Structures are given as C-alpha cells and as structure tokens.
Image (tube, rainbow, N blue to C red):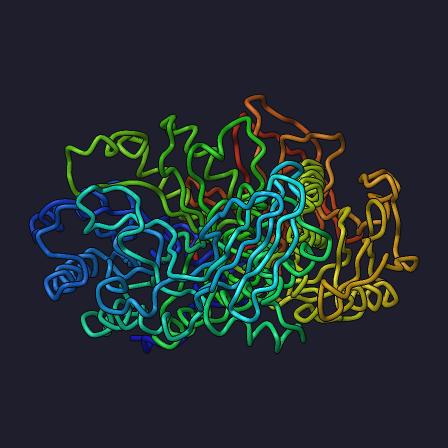
Amino acid sequence: MIPSNAPKPWQMIADTSVDEAAADFAAPPPEYGLTLWWGWDGPITEEVIARDLDAISARGIRCVTIEAGYGMSAPYLSSAWFETVRLAVAHARRRGMRVYLVDEGKYPSGFAGGKFSAERPDLRMQGLAVAERIAVAPGETLSRQLGLEVVGAIAVNLADQTSQPLDTGSGELRWKAPAGEWEVWLVDRGFRTSVTRAVSNPTRGKDAVNSLCDYLNPQATRQFIAFTHAQYAQALGEEFGHTVMGFRGDEPDFATTPWTPDLPDEFQRLKGYDVRPYLASFFAPTLTDEARRVRADYWDVWSDLFGEHFFRVQADWCAEHGLEYLVHLNHEDEMPKLVRSEGDFFKVLRHVQMPGVDAIWNQIWPGKVADFPKLASSAAHLFGRPRAFSESFAAYHIQPTVEQARWVIDHQFVRGINMLEVMFYPSSAADPERSGWLEADEVPAVAATVERAAYLLSLGRPAAQIALYFPTSSIWLGDETANARAWEIARQLLEQQRDFDFVDEQALASLLRLAGDTLANLSGQRYRAVIVPPVSAISQAALERLRAFAESGGGVVFLGPEPALVVEKTFLEATGPADVGWAIREPAGELTPRILEALPRPDVALDRPCAPVKALHRRWRDADVYFFFNESEEGQSRRVTLAGNGQAQAWDAASGRIEPLSGVTSKDGFVSMPLDLAPYETRFIVVGPVPVVAAMPQLGRLQ
C-alpha cells in the first residue's frame, strides 16, 4: 500500500506516455471518476449507508462526497458523527469506492458547525461597516467621544453625495457642519460574519447565528482544523490517501469589508504607510481618486492574508496527510462580485491542490456563453496542479435531461475542468431533488464516459500557448470595463480554437519563469504569447517580466490604450501611463487579423471558421492530445490541422476503444484530417505512436 502521505499519480503532473495512458483507458482508476454529492438527512444507519452506496454504485459512480444534513441522529462533529462517517468509509472501501469529506456542516466553510460562536468567539470573523449615521444640521457642531472600536468617520453631504474625512485620531470627534444636508458616518470594526447555513439551525435558513472564523487569522484556521480535519484524522487516518481522497471546501467569502486585528500592522509592513486614516473613506458614496487607490492597496493586502492564512494553512495540512484540498469560491461568473467578497481568485487559490468553480442556477446551459471554468483550470495550470473541479447542477431551476447534463459537463471539460462533482443524492428517498437526470437509465454509461474523459484530461501537461492577463487590480480600482473586455477576448479566442490560460499579476511578476522565448508555469507548460486586455493598472514587476519576455522573442500584445497606472509598491503612489512601446500594440482593443497573425501558429486550425467548435490541447511525453466539443445543435464538418507527429487516433471515451483515423496527411510537424461532429458531439484525437496492443487486447485493429 502507498504510504498515505506519499504523492499519488492523480496528485501530480506527470509526463505520461501513450502506452501508460492506454493501459487504464478502458477502466480508469476510481480516483478519476466523477463524485456524487451525498447529502445525509435524517437518521443515518448502516442500513441506509449500504442502501445508498449500492444504489450509487449501480449508477456507475465510484466516488461520493459526504455532506452533513438536517435531522441526523448523530449531531455534526459529535463522536457519533465521526463513528458514522467511519462506517460509511468502510462500506465505500469494500465497494472499491472513494470518498471526499465536506469540511463543514453545510456552508460556507469555516464555522465548524457553530463551534466558533459557542466555544471560540474570540476567533470569529471580523469586518468593517458603517455602524452609525448621525444627522447634523448646517451650523451645528457634533461632539462625540468615540469607543476603541471606531476606526474612522466621514461627513457625507446627502445633497450631492460628496464626503470629507473627519479626524478621529484622538478618540474624540468634533465637527461643525457647513451648508448642506449632512450625515456623519461612524465606521467601526467588530465581529461580523457572512451568513451561514448550518445543520444545527432549526430554521434551515441562512443567518448570522453561527459565525464563521476569522479567515485572515492563521490561529483561527488552525482552530478550524482542530475542530474538523484533526478529528477526522483520529477516526479515519489509516484511510487518508486511500479511500478518503480529501477535504472539500465551499464558498468562503466576506459579506463586509474584511478586518483582523493584525491587518494595520501587516498593511504598514507591505505598503509602507498607515491605512487607518483612510478606512472610513472606503464607505463614501463616491470615492476620491486617493481613496480608490488606498482601497486597492487594502484589497491587495487582505487578499494576501486570505490566501496565506486560510487557504494555505488547510492545503498544507492536507498535503501532510496525503489528501487534497479542493474548494471553490463564490460568484466566479461575476468577477467584480467575487473580487469584492474574496479579493483575488488566483491569490487565494494559489496553494490549493484542486481549485474549482461552481456551476449553479443554470449558469452553464446550452446557448449561454459561460467561460468562467477557465478560471479554475488556469489556476491549476499556473500552480502545477493536475486537476481542476466543478460543482455542477446544484439549484438548477431547470432540471437537465441526460443530453443537457452531458452538454454542461463537456462545456466545462473543453475549458480545462477534469474533475466533476455532481449534485445531488440525498439519503432521504422522498427528497424531490432525488429525481432528475441522475435517475435515467443512461447514467451508468454517462458515468463511464465522463470517467474516461476526465482521466485523459488529467494526464500529461496542458499545452495552450497563449496567456491572457486577468485584470484583478483594475477591478480593485473600480474598472469593471477591464473585466468585461477580458472575457470578450476570452470568448473570441475560444471561438477560434485558440486555447489559452488566464494569468494573474502575481504569476507574471514572480511565478512564470523565462525559458528562452517562452514563459513556463509550474506545470511545465510554456506560453509563447501574452495578451493584455484594456486595463487601467499593471504592476512594474509584471511589466518588467513582459518586457524581458518580448526581448527574448516572446509575443506581448497590449490591446487598447496603455495602462494608466504602473504600480510598484503601492497603488497610492502609482504613476503612469505605462511605456509599452516595446510590445505589439492594437489601440482599437480588438483581436484584429494583424494581432492574430502575431500570435503563435495555431496548434488547432480549421479550414473554415466554426465558432461552436471548441478545442483543448494537452501534451503527453510522446503524443499530443486534443479534445473537441461541438456546442451547437447542428452538425459541423471541417478539415482540421493539428500540431503533432505520428499516427492520428480516435480515443473513444464512450467505449474505451482506440482506432486509427483515415484521411490523414502529415507535413512539417502537423497532421490534417476530416473533423465531423454531430450535434453536441465530443471527440478525442491523439497524435503520436500507436499504443502497444498487448496492453489492451481489444485494440486488434491497430495491429
């Protein structure tokens, strides 16, 4: 048996060969299969556990994610709870199944089923907010002694929405109102939590009764682990890395402006100035340029703390125990909202073993443009993680058919997701959510197809040659146009079969390694071009890396005007505009034919444009692997040219068979062949050596 803390094949980037991939293609290990969210409601007995796992296994699903539910006879995090989980894991092991553990008693992660409110109130989440609004008539003087919790004050003229900061440094406020319609807003720090949905809440609703922990305080995260992960280790430690695969986190975020007692000192250390005089200005109806810049500095700092003190602490614990930490954030489909509540997608997920997204409320559906799964796959690629996951189908108000569910899954696969978590299997057979596509007769075949596809998409290394800069820092400054333009460029690239990854500011500045005329990420993937959409700010460190890349022969494209601000240590002191005369420029901000011509030669090229066909490219040690998806309800026929040398083969995820393709021509490291895709059809094409027949006896046609 592999030691529980030793890296497993599914946890590593590896240079897989064709023969190695073919050996397990027909029947991949269960670690690559989709996982079904198994919600425990009501009494969970051994009989219920056995019944549910048998039913789930009969659907061809070999992995479950266990979530605590309502009305359980064993209270969440009690000794009886852990004994019940241990029993379930034992039953899963006997059936050859795998298990993920939800790290919370519902969501978001981090309240330990209410233990922070009940046992460690000192480690609860904190935030800044306007605590009091005081009307002050023109000519009136407001005099007030302030408590230690008050961090600042502003006077707001309701007539024109202007404001002015007030001096509160002495602990006393004294201000005479000029002409206008004035209110003084007092901003304080305090224990403020995002709402939680807890299994112990008799209302079954979302409220603030069970507080989240202080995400920015590593002591609070370690206490969260002590309440949860460490207790599972005592009960299940011998199964870690074997039957138990990892801990699943869910939507940690902030409902108010984040605060922790050490934040001002950390801000001073990182930015070199005192943020406290500016804190109240963040709440002004209209921000001044100075306040907007300081707020961006603040978001930069607390994003660092969130990533290092909450996510990294858990990821490190999981790594030490041979587990994976998989988690998704909130609002991935609306990045300005995510930035407000979670700071920086890439910073906070930098250390997570399996970054993810959440596909809920029919966000991904036939006919919709929904490219946000690219965020999770890009993070995985940048940070050397082999897999990215999606929680799919929760709260879909239109329940999908099997065909529609396959479309949602394939839509995400072709954007780099390679681990699927699907909703929902409640232990209560009467639960109305039990119905839906997961009850269909075709589900075992779908599960097998998804498992083989996820297996192929997890092997080797990503191969996209283009990086697209994601403008988080511009969103911090209030520039939501930069976000919209980035997604528009992403859409255009995908519709032209130009696979890409998003890259963030931090990766450009410190992670990507200059390797000849390429930039290499931690997956060993190499970018030959970086596209910067119209943005308002960029760091000096990122600019320097991009300039060195351009001077080494890489392609750097700036779309639109040059960034107005260049940030060295602080946004407050940033100057500009950026000098990008050394880069390829397109002032119109569009992917014009000239810009497309300047990008690397496409590794996927169709003889005629076809926006509905999407393509993904991965590289094995001795082969190139392509995945195609026709997102259209109409069939598509084209001739495709692919980068690669060797035999072009169809690897059929539905049957597990491998067959040579006909009509193939080869020239100068590229192969060309017909590509005929029925409506909603997918296709794997591998270009490389034919796998050894002995490894898979059914491959007789390849002899």
Image: 346 above or below 533: below
| Residue appearing at x 82%, y 56% in the figure | 556
| Residue appearing at x 72%, y 57% in the figure | 290
| Image location of residue 410, percent across then percent down | 49, 39
Residue furthest to the top in view is: 634
Q: Nearer the viewer, residue 139 or 100?
A: 139
Residue furthest to the right in view is: 581
| Image location of residue 466, percent across then percent down | 72, 53
Image: 413 above or below 514: above
Q: Nearer the viewer, residue 485 or 546?
A: 485
| Image location of residue 62, percent across then percent down | 29, 51
| Image location of residue 520, percent across then percent down | 69, 67
Q: Nearer the viewer, residue 257 or 696?
A: 257
Is residue 21 visible from the viewing direction of this image? no
Check the picture and name the quadrant holding the N terminus.
Answer: bottom left
| Residue appearing at x 13%, y 57% in the figure | 75
Q: Quadrant of residue 112?
A: bottom left
Is residue 690 visible from the viewing direction of this image? yes
* In-image side of 331 versus 531 (left or right): left
